[in-house]
Image (tube, coloured by chain):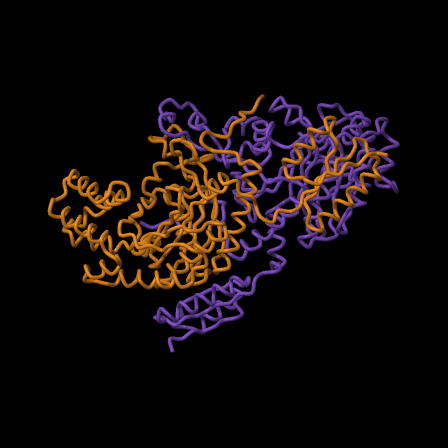
Chain colours: A purple, B orange
Amino acid sequence: MALNKKPVTGMKDIMPEEMEIRDYVIALIKETYKSFGFTPMETPAMESIENLSSKQGGENEKLIFKVMKRGEKLKLEEAKTPDDLVDAGMRYDLTVPLVRYYSNHANELPKPFKALQIGPVWRADRPQKGRFRQFYQCDIDILGEPTNLAEIECITATTTLLGKLGFQNFRVHINDRRILKAMAALSGFAEADYDKVFIILDKMDKIGVDGVKAELLESGFAPEAVEKYGQIFDGLNAAEDRLAYVGDLLENKEAVDSLKEITASVEAVKAVPFELMFDPTLVRGMSYYTGTIFEIEIDGLNCSCGGGGRYDEMVGRFTNLQTPACGFSIGFERIITILLDQGFKVPGSRDRIAFLVEKNLPSEKLCEVMKEAAALREKGHQVLVNVMAKNKKFQKDQLQTEGYADIREVFAR
Amino acid sequence: MALNKKPVTGMKDIMPEEMEIRDYVIALIKETYKSFGFTPMETPAMESIENLSSKQGGENEKLIFKVMKRGEKLKLEEAKTPDDLVDAGMRYDLTVPLVRYYSNHANELPKPFKALQIGPVWRADRPQKGRFRQFYQCDIDILGEPTNLAEIECITATTTLLGKLGFQNFRVHINDRRILKAMAALSGFAEADYDKVFIILDKMDKIGVDGVKAELLESGFAPEAVEKYGQIFDGLNAAEDRLAYVGDLLENKEAVDSLKEITASVEAVKAVPFELMFDPTLVRGMSYYTGTIFEIEIDGLNCSCGGGGRYDEMVGRFTNLQTPACGFSIGFERIITILLDQGFKVPGSRDRIAFLVEKNLPSEKLCEVMKEAAALREKGHQVLVNVMAKNKKFQKDQLQTEGYADIREVFAR
């Protein structure tokens, strides 16, 4: 019987060239974040279906790959809905598993706990070019640190990593959910409407202040509130120092002072040139954020390459352990795609040496080759021993494209 | 709503101490096998349910975690069996995915293709101590190499790896399915009965020749065949050179000569002390093996830590591409368990330095600490910056158990 050759719909096989880059990037991520004291950890790929359906995952909960019950627990006749047949699902992010892990092991873990997770997640999204149903996420999170030290470390560690990957002149947009809310309140929007307002505000970079105002009006918000909101952003656009401008506007300066501290510290220690930019239109989709939010934009790539923020209430809500938290997730797959597109070569690759041994080489001679290969490997070379093909020229061309510049032929006599 | 704190039944969270060892071992595996020219590759965690149910997986096919169809394709009312609701499953090994990958990409891959796969597999086995339903496998396979070079490289690479992990004085048992079959034929067993005979033969190390004979008789095999079979193994046990003894017995010496060549070459190049031992009672469960088979036993641990062999027919059977193949799978989880039990310390770990900064340290002072931390990280240290806790003694004790020997306190004045 023949196999179905293709991977399951929407998922992909990783070819050797890409795998080499992925392995390199993962090693660099681990090395860099570990130097900041982050601790690698891992959870199973599956979580109980209840944990995945707890509403924390937002839209992602509609995209769960569900795992069927097994054995006696699987009762097709009694099932009223398909969910009656399910007891687990593939994780759609690394945040739900982190929170569960933390609540399960809090007593054994350092305080604060600086977690590093790299691993696949699964989402049954509509298949589309460049987006896959299994993809890696790479998250750092600091659980249990209420001060800005968490933000400063998350941003510094992540930008240090991007620098090591060769990225420069990127921008870290930074904002605070408390500022977003205060400006909406100041304009007169009702608290219940904030999320709707922010979804429209998020389009500012594409449609401008007038576009945002028009959409707010279309959505039925009060013209006075929309007008006031527009004035604030017009003022921001004209301001020399936007953060100072917001500080003058708001009565409670806590969030502004917090951003000032984070900005000053990150600027003081940054290892690569990048811009940390207060962006009062930065929203970040997940409504669980409670304070600072940030997002990375790389020049010339019109998209976010990572983001995160403070979410002080989520862990407590799910575990009854009140735990301040701050995290940063880099767009692992996007970074790999960029590096592949740039023709990135993994630095410091070993020299590659290939021995082509004639077919039916006497045993003693083969042993000699194997010994020489072992000695070369010991010295740090990558050494391949292959049987010489009939079409030797083709074989050598192939080996050269695989990076074997040094090809040594061994004949029986 | 509260989360279910525990991982799903039979799966486990990986704690920081274990994770450190796993990361180290995985890095060493990749480095070592890559030095032999093996190429890392990866496939999705799921395969189509047809591929997983193709009978190649033997008993494992009963243990599949099945993934439910989604959207319009999921029709509960029309389902006659639960399988009507399923379109994919979690892989239970790395061999089925390898064969599918190879048949999908053969034209783009080197010939022979030396694959390295490390990753989780899933089996809904009965939960028991030390065995989990998600666990890592680590396989190397050489596809497209018909000569003993494949066996020699698989054994040499794997034993080199074990040496680097600090293992010594282990044994590699080696046999050939062709010898197993020839000895069964010589004794007069019918070919259809070989697998049953071999299952009993496999118990030789526990029950001895007499025990094997007794069980064969109990199973209803002809007394003459059982007697002859017993004589062969009695002769083997008495023989000085078991391989020579088998050579004298058999008319077709091909398999014996092959084992001689493999043994001579591996012995000649081995980098660590281990014993390569012809073991005529070695069976290996999977019936897809066609030639050489091998298994690793580590002294004092009464169990196999890996094994493999030649399976020249499987790829062709599934893909219609006749492809000789030979592979070696190490018992990744078992090796991790051994290292954990031995209190293994990852060598060359970075120096760990912790700064404890007083709460509400002025921004400028915090920046100084962050700069110093950055400089130390640049020099290769692992540096943690934490806010000083009220119970500082407890905090410092904790940090010391985490390996932070150098703890520096920073006060506001």
Indicate the position of residue A87 as horizontal and vertical percent values.
Answer: 45, 28
Q: How many marks?
A: 0
Can the viewer see residue B163? yes
| Residue A216 placement: quadrant | top right
Q: In the shown orientation, is residue B328 left or right of residue B341?
A: left
Residue at point 69% right, 30% down? B395
Q: Residue furthest bottom?
A: A413
Indicate the position of residue B42 as horizontal and vertical percent values.
Answer: 49, 50
Indicate the position of residue B196 as horizontal and vertical percent values.
Answer: 22, 43
Residue at point 81% right, 43% down? B368
Quarter in which the N terminus of chain B is drawn: top right
Can the viewer see residue B73? no
Quarter in which the C terminus of chain B is drawn: top right
Q: In the image shown, does A244 or B205 lie closer to the viewer?
A: B205
Q: In the shown orientation, is residue B326 left or right of residue A66?
A: left
Q: In the image shown, does B214 or A408 lie closer to the viewer?
A: B214
Q: Is residue B399 above or below residue B270?
A: above
Q: In the shown orientation, is residue A231 left or right of residue B224?
A: right
Q: Is residue A201 above or below residue A192?
A: below
Q: In the image shown, does A287 or B299 lie closer to the viewer?
A: B299
| Residue A358 placement: quadrant | bottom left
Q: In the image shown, does A345 or B265 lie closer to the viewer?
A: B265
Residue at point 33% right, 30% down? B80
Q: In the shown orientation, is residue B135 left or right of residue A191?
A: left
Indicate the position of residue A63 as horizontal and vertical percent values.
Answer: 53, 35
| Residue B388 placement: quadrant | top right
